[in-house]
Image (tube, rainbow, N blue to C red):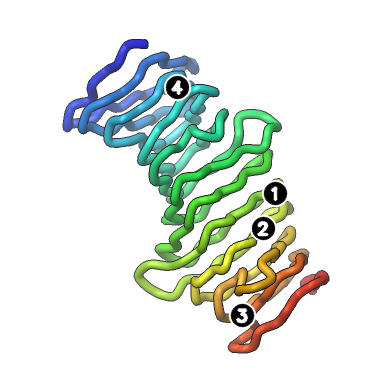
């Protein structure tokens, strides 16, 4: 497969018309940016400065591997467990698998905005950093198994969507955890799955699992289910 070198000015792919496939590897110091409302499928891999998705849909197919991926809007579809090999910044938009197959993302994640996890099960095994208070809309079952921390302040997580968000890690973010819809499942029996402050279930939200919550400064061992109003 041919390799295209992206220079320092970067390369923008605008898919405003029909969807298409790019079967090429990328190298160089420049960044690849996707705009336009249609779908672009990448069948190659990238060792350049990374990929930014600002609009439309990008599919990383069954053999693609990209590093330093930034999602600001649109939809990022992952077709293999090694699709994102380096840092993943989720600043907005939707991330999903490209079909019903459950996928694993091993890259460290920065939550720089509110994000939707759509359609199929995704497990994120890398550590997660909050740079602000975030709403995570989960439509299926998604797991953040790395440690969730924060950078630049005390930040909260709001769980939205009808799906299940699983937190098996010993997390250290210090803001509240709010469950507005769906289920928050805590599965860490030895450390706090939800940081160190308040956990609230409201609306149709449910908290379940076998783990540890912190309510105020008090530890609560949790083996059952609590529902919102």
**Image quadrant occupied by the N terminus:** top left
Residue most extreme to the left:
8
- Numbered disc 1: secondary structure: strand
The quadrant holding residue 214 is bottom right
Q: Is residue 16 above or below residue 103?
A: above
**Residue 42: image location, x then y, percent:** 45, 22
Q: Is residue 99 above or below residue 125?
A: above
* Residue designated by label 3: 198
Mark positioned earlier in the residue sequence (3 or 4)? 4
* Residue designated by label 2: 166
Residue drawn at x 45%, y 42% is 73
**Residue 101: image location, x then y, percent:** 68, 32
Alpha carbon distance from label 4 to label 2: 30 Å
* Residue designated by label 4: 42
Alpha carbon distance from label 2 to label 3: 17 Å
Alpha carbon distance from label 3 to label 1: 23 Å
Residue drawn at x 36%, y 34% is 51
**Residue 61: image location, x then y, percent:** 52, 23
Residue most extreme to the bottom:
217
Q: Nearer the viewer, mark 4 or mark 2?
A: 2
Alpha carbon distance from label 4 to label 1: 26 Å
Q: Nearer the viewer, mark 2 or mark 3?
A: 2
Judging depth in this view, the residue of 176 and 202 nearest the camera is: 176
Q: Is residue 162 above or below residue 32?
A: below
Alpha carbon distance from label 3 to label 4: 43 Å
Estimate how packed mark 2 is, as few (under 14), some (14 to 19) or many (20 or more) residues with alpha carbons within 10 Å: many
């Amino acid at each position: 497969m041919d390799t295209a070198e992206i220079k320092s000015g970067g390369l923008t792919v605008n898919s405003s018309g029909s969807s298409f496939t790019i079967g090429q590897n990328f190298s160089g110091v420049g960044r690849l940016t996707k705009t336009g409302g249609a779908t672009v499928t990448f069948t190659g891999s990238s060792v350049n400065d990374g990929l930014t998705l600002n609009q439309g849909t990008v599919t990383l197919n069954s053999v693609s591997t990209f590093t330093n991926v930034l999602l600001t809007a649109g939809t990022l579809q992952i077709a293999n467990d090694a699709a994102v090999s380096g840092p993943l910044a989720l600043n907005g938009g939707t991330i999903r698998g490209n079909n019903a197959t459950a996928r694993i993302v091993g890259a460290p994640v920065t939550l720089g905005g509110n994000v939707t996890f759509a359609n199929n099960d995704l497990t994120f095994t890398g550590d997660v950093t909050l740079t602000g208070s975030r709403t995570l809309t989960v439509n299926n079952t998604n797991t953040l198994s790395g440690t969730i921390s924060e950078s630049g302040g005390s930040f909260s997580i709001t769980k939205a969507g009808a799906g299940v968000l699983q937190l098996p890690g010993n997390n250290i973010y210090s803001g509240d955890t709010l469950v507005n819809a769906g289920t928050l499942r805590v599965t860490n029996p030895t450390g706090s799955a939800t940081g160190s402050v308040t956990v609230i279930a409201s609306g149709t939200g449910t908290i379940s699992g076998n783990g540890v919550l912190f309510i105020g400064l008090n530890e609560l061992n949790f083996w059952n289910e609590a529902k919102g109003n």
